[in-house]
């Protein structure tokens, strides 16, 4: 049994060719295409965009030069790495910790109890993970009063992990204008 395969001329004569053509829109923006009525309007828009592109290029170049000068000054100050290294560090500061998260009462209590249980173990014993102890700690958590829960969160937020850093940080949130806050 052979398959029917229509010829190109049959396809052109089909209903697909007779449908009214829809205006095509860009996939994301759904905005109508701009149609300029005359060559003068098109030329004006072209010059405006050329000026804008040139201004943007100059502004980006000035910003790049300022960052490069800052990297050079860091190189003179610290001297252990190349200028490119410091330049990359300046540009990658958004990936560093910049803003702290709010500490939840449950997470504070869970981490505090896991630390306490692990500190009671022998030095050569394998440390417990929070996932292994969650059921046991959850039973203790349900017994605690609301004031005790708040006290646990306040204590955990001030203590953190013992390094002086806040207990929870989010590396994907930025301070003002994308810079790390000075502390």
Image: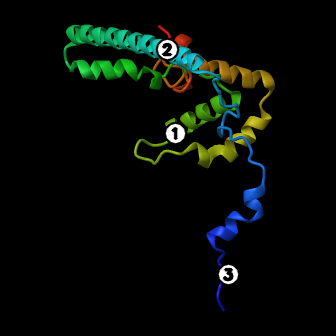
User: Is 95 located above or below residue 55 in the figure?
Assistant: below
Q: Which secondary structure, mark 2?
A: helix
The image quarter in which residue 93 lies: top left
Observer-side mark, 3 or 1, equals: 3
Q: Position of residue 79 (x, y in %)?
A: 19, 14
Q: Which secondary structure, mark 3?
A: loop
Q: Position of residue 25 (x, y in %)?
A: 68, 38
Do callouts 2 and 3 mark residues in contact (Cβ within 8 Å)? no
Q: Residue at x 68, y 63 (%)?
A: 12
Mark 1 = which residue?
118
Pick whichever, 161 or 127, lies toward us: 161
The residues tagged by marks 2 and 3 sit, at their Cα atoms, a distance apart of 55 Å
Residue closest to the far bottom:
1
The residues tagged by marks 1 and 2 sit, at their Cα atoms, a distance apart of 69 Å
- Mark 2: few, some, or many residues within 10 Å (few <14, many ≥20)? few
Q: Residue at x 69, y 47 (%)?
A: 135
User: Is 88 located above or below residue 60 in the figure?
Assistant: below
Q: Which mark is residue 47?
A: 2
Q: Position of residue 114 (x, y in %)?
A: 58, 37
Looking at marks 1 and 2 on the same chain, the residue that comes earlier in the sequence is marked by: 2
């Amino acid at each position: 049994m052979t398959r029917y395969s229509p010829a190109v001329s049959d396809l052109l004569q089909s209903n697909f060719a007779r449908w009214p053509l829809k205006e095509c829109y860009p996939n994301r923006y759904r905005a109508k295409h701009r149609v300029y009525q005359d060559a003068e309007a098109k030329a004006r828009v072209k010059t405006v965009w050329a000026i804008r592109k040139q201004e943007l290029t100059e502004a980006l170049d000035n910003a790049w030069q300022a960052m490069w000068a800052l990297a050079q000054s860091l190189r003179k100050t610290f001297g252990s790495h190349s200028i490119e290294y410091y330049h990359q560090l300046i540009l990658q500061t958004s990936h560093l910790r910049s803003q702290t998260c709010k500490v939840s009462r449950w997470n504070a209590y869970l981490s505090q109890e896991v630390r306490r249980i692990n500190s009671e173990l022998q030095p050569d014993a394998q440390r417990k993970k929070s996932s292994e102890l969650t059921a046991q700690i959850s039973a203790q958590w349900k017994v605690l009063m609301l004031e005790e829960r708040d006290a646990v969160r306040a204590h955990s937020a001030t203590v953190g992990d013992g390094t002086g850093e806040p207990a929870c940080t989010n590396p994907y949130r930025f301070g003002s204008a994308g810079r790390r806050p000075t502390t």
